[in-house]
Amino acid sequence: MASELVIVYHRQPYEEVEEDGRTVLKENASPNGIVPTLKSFFGSVDHGAWIAWKLAEDTSNPDFEPIIEVNDSYGTYAVSRLPLSADQVREFYHVTSKEAFWPILHSFKERYNYDPVDWPNFREVNWRFAEAAAAEAADGAVVWVHDYNLWLVPGYLRQLRPDVKISFFHHTPFPAADMFNVLPWRKEIVESLLCCDQIGFHIPRYASNFVSTARSLVDVTVSERRRVDSDLISEGTALTERMVPARVRWNDREVEIRVAPVGVNVDYIETRARDAATRAAAAEIRADMGDTKLILSVGRTDYTKGGVEQLASFERVLEKRAELHGAARLMHVSVSANRNMTAYEEIQSQIEETAGRINGRFGTLEWQPIALISRAIPFDELAAYYAAADVAWITPLADGMNLVAKEFVASRLDGDGVLVLSEFAGAAVELSSAVITNPFSHRSMDEAILAALDMGAEERRTRMAELRKAVRRNDLSTWGRDVARMGKQAKAEAPTP
């Protein structure tokens, strides 16, 4: 059955688990995942389709079902599963996406690795995604493509199905032209994206960077600019923009540029925070801490997250302020992003070595300054720590958005707590009432965490009230409506080639 809405995303829209020797499909458990939000759009169409890849030992296995029908709480929809071998996944995802694209997207030019990239494999995988989307799409359907590892899909899809309306959403930062243009495939990527009817970004800076990059590579003209909404202006922060391109023209095609910051599921988080078990766990944590202040840091083990730099700041603070010995403790959660990649293993080792050195220098039998956790914490457990923490210390060196900061704010039903946030996280343009810091500056980092620890109750509550308004204003449902509007407008407004 042809689909009015086709979502193209590298992940499958469910979790596969083994039960009694058979594979069972279960809905994603994450409260803030993009996947459940995207699936919710299937309720507005008669039939939808999802395109994803699936690891296959034998990609030519005749028993493999390339298309399955799923019926869950979000409706009935088809899932086209592209069988990829382990080598294809490694080349497409671990090498090209993570070793070449990821460092450039986050402006870490020194970590860019071009040599091992198999570009023909990346093209082939993207072509297969485009073919599957073309096969599933009804006449004039909307096809939504998500994220950088599918950059070439729009261009291929436009060749295969000139009738469909294509929206693309970019979930990472988009860097400035002088950074992006390090990629030797830059023009091919940008020309593919310009085959879309609409392209969406989290914040105005990323949209502006994309248009600037496009203009450096092809003959693009900006046909409309808009003033940035005041809710996305945080005075003095690194990522703030005041004007943003809204439409561009290329090859007689009008492309809309949209800004839609992703949020968290505030209602779900508040429900978990109100749960009696969560409140009891938070109270137990506070009782165990006594008068010691709890600083909470949560992120992936990734060089973009600034984990080593944050620990170094905590070490300097302990050197300067002896009164904090025994009076403050950092719970540093650094979950391995990908155990198969050397870069992440190195970062994990540095984090462990730094935390060990700090505990060795300052720790006593009664007090260890850092509790280092390298496993994923279930959300219900994490919600208790959000509620109990005095400070959330979120200081990535670069981050497309950062949902941990928003989760912390949404969890604070008591209206207390302090958020220290890097000005290089996309969320900083929304969360101006956080203590904003520059993670590249020792002085800024040290002063920010000390300001948070020393902050009085009245200021804490004033800031948190503003933060909670901002998180509620741009929650996950708002992002979903903005993205859905992108798709509807693409279908209604875009000219058919």
Image (cartoon, grey):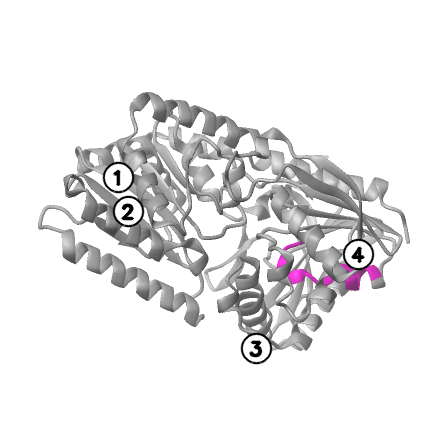
- 273 in relation to 140, above or below: above
- Amino acid residing under circle 4: Cys
Q: Quadrant of residue 37?
A: top right
Secondary-structure class at tag 4: loop
Q: Residues within 10 Å of mark 1 (few under 14, many from 20)?
A: many
Q: Nearer the viewer, mark 3 or mark 1?
A: 1
Earlier residue among tags 3 and 1: 3
Tell me the residue that label 4 is attached to: 195
Residue 87, numbered circle: 3
Q: Quadrant of residue 191?
A: bottom right
Q: Quadrant of the C terminus?
A: bottom right
Earlier residue among tags 1 and 2: 1
* Residue 17 point in image, percent of width and height: 49, 58
- 42 in relation to 150, above or below: above
Q: Residues within 10 Å of mark 2 (few under 14, many from 20)?
A: some
- 92 in relation to 142, above or below: below
Tell me the residue that label 1 is attached to: 294
Secondary-structure class at tag 2: strand
Residue at mark 3 to residue at mark 1: CA–CA distance: 44 Å
Residue at mark 4 to residue at mark 3: CA–CA distance: 29 Å
By secondary structure, the bulk of the magenta-drawn segment is best described as helix
Nearest to the observer: residue 44 or residue 455: 455
Q: Do residues under tags 1 and 2 come within 8 Å of each other at their CB atoms?
A: yes
Residue at mark 2 to residue at mark 3: CA–CA distance: 37 Å
Residue at mark 2 to residue at mark 4: CA–CA distance: 46 Å
Tell me the residue that label 2 is attached to: 331
